[in-house]
Image: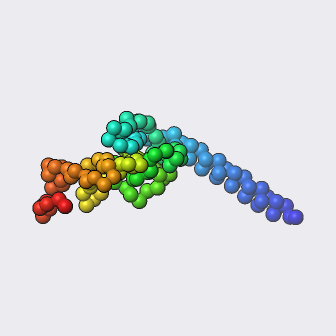
Amino acid sequence: MSRRWMLRTLFSVLFLSALLGISSLTGERLLADAPTHSVSFNASFDDDNIGTPYLVDHPYNDRIGFASSITALEDYTFAFFIVNGHVRFDLEPDHMFIVNGEMEIEAVFSGDEKYAVVFMDTNGEIIKLEYVDENANAIPPGEELWPTKPGFVVDALL
């Protein structure tokens, strides 16, 4: 091996080590300077069993979620999430949310004999959540709760 090759290799290793050291220091500094945001967690099981929101602070870009044990609750089945007032049927119960600001996350469950029924507008924003017995009808929200949009008229609720 030539001395020149050894110096190049040594220089490359030192440069790479220094680069990794700088990037890790920068990463730590970025995490230390990251703003924290309030995240509210809640769960609804039926009309009489709606939890009290649990408020925690998390740094920006942090990944958060519910404990995996929520899928193993006896007598209840996960139905959907409500995230910042919007209904999310597309998320699994083990979904990891990325904190990008203040957040309100609610896990909604249906019971063995009661079903979660949600009324929402065309943007997925929640209007009303209620629990309905099997084979019973949901009670639509009053007109005062319906969104006001140009050309939107409620003629009748089926």
**In the image, is 144 to the left or to the right of 121?**
left
Coloured how?
rainbow
The number of numbered badges drawn on the structure is 0
Visible residue check, residue 24 = yes
Instruction: Find residue 22 and report its horizontal and vertical position in percent.
Output: 61, 48
Residue situated furthest front in the rendering: 135
Instruction: Find residue 70 and report its horizontal and vertical position in percent.
Output: 49, 45
Which residue occupies the foreground of this view, 9 or 133? 133
Is the residue 15 above or below the residue 151 in the image? above
Instruction: Find residue 6 and report its horizontal and vertical position in percent.
Output: 82, 60
Which residue occupies the foreground of this view, 21 or 43? 43
The N terminus sits in image quarter:
bottom right
- Residue placed at 86% from the left, 64% from the top? 2
Residue situated furthest right in the rendering: 1
Question: Toward which corner of the image does residue 125 lie, by quadrant?
Answer: bottom left
- Residue placed at 65% from the left, 51% from the top? 20
Which residue occupies the foreground of this view, 30 or 93? 93
- Residue placed at 27% from the left, 59% from the top? 123
Visible residue check, residue 126 = no
- Residue placed at 74% from the left, 55% from the top? 13
**In the image, is 122 to the left or to the right of 77?**
left
Instruction: Find residue 55 and report its horizontal and vertical position in percent.
Output: 41, 36
The C terminus sits in image quarter:
bottom left
Which residue occupies the foreground of this view, 123 or 143? 143
